[in-house]
Amino acid sequence: MAPESRHTRANRENWNASSREYQAIHRTELEGDVLWGPSMPPEKDLKVLGSSMRGKDVLEVCCGGGQSAAYLAAEGARVTGVDFSSEQLAHARAFVRSKKVRVRFIESNVEDLSMLKASSFDIAFSAYALGFVEEIDLTFREVSRVLRPGGLFAFSWQSPIYQITAEGTLEFRRSYFDRTPIVFKEESGTEVDFPRTHGDWHAALTRAGFVVTDILEPEPIPKENTYADVFPLAKIRMIPGTTIWRARRPRRLEL
Ligand SMILES: C[S@@+](CC[C@H](N)C(=O)[O-])C[C@H]1O[C@@H](n2cnc3c(N)ncnc32)[C@H](O)[C@@H]1O
């Protein structure tokens, strides 16, 4: 495994430093479902991951405080969650204990999933995290490797159009084509986001052997969210705040 990059270290340290406050503000909204994004309809309605979890082997990539993992475990899945923040994972472990479900948690940068066996999951997913990940090609290749042939991969992140707007307005603050990392200085430390266009995400999935089946841009539900400092309902009603990608590892790899 390559040494941790400067940006990845900054993100990990920032998640460790901000986890307690993040969970205090958002955990109630995150519980009891998979929250794909601010004011997004619940997974119970969207069914991005399919209609039944019973008996499925599910990998959550960047599992955070474990709320989605606990929900899917309660629905009958065998869930593994990977995250690089020890603080987020401490919350996740306590949370699944409180819900009396079992989830396997692993502390790792998701660019390296070498601890997981090839072809061992039916579903892999990630909710609002992969824009923090620098080496997306490595990550997607790893996710593809651990999925069974025909397996489903779904993830959400900010819409690339939303990401270039200024906070609180619809004005553009940077070019859609600018891939320079976005660095936020916060009280807890430094957050780094890696902007990618729709074409970039699609190309990265394709390079990893995935076939993209859906690009979902659900309309928000009419309910304000706890991320409204960045995603106020009034704004995400005008332009999509969240994009959800759905892809399959083909049953047979085309050579
Ligand atoms: C917004 S949370 C996602 C979890 C949950 N869906 C939520 O919305 O709270 C982002 C998570 O990604 C994790 N993360 C970011 N970059 C990562 C990386 N390179 N490897 C592993 N975890 C990472 C952070 O530690 C954090 O727990």
Image (tube, rainbow, N blue to C red):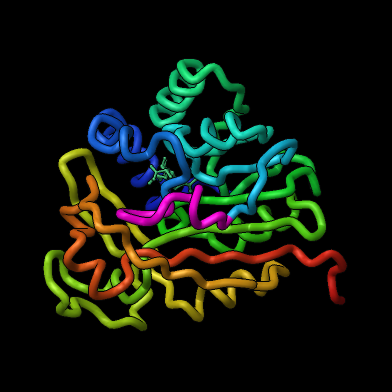
Left or right relative to 77: residue 239 = left
Left or right relative to 103: residue 63 = left
Furthest toward the left, the residue is: 168
Is residue 104 shown above or below 35?
above
Q: Residue at x 31, y 58 (%)?
A: 221
What secondary structure is the magenta-colored segment mainly? loop
| Residue 116: percent from left, percent from top | 72, 39
Residue 12's image quarter?
A: top left
Q: Residue at x 47, y 56 (%)?
A: 130
- Magenta stretch in the rendered image: 36-48
Displayed-image quarter of ligand 1: top left
Left or right relative to 64: residue 74 = right
Instruction: Locate the C terminus by quadrant.
Output: bottom right
Q: Nearer the viewer, residue 125 or 85?
A: 125
| Residue 92: percent from left, percent from top | 46, 27
- Residue 85 visible, this angle: no
Q: Nearer the viewer, residue 84 or 237?
A: 237
Q: Is residue 56 magenta?
A: no
Residue 27's image quarter?
A: top left
Q: Nearer the viewer, residue 105 or 55?
A: 55
Q: Residue at x 64, y 53 (%)?
A: 50
| Residue 148: percent from left, percent from top | 79, 52
Is residue 110 shown above or below 67?
below
| Residue 140: percent from left, percent from top | 62, 60
- Counting labels gives 0
Q: Residue at x 25, y 30 (%)?
A: 24
- Residue 174 visible, this angle: yes
Q: Is residue 47 magenta?
A: yes
Is residue 183 shown above or below 59?
below
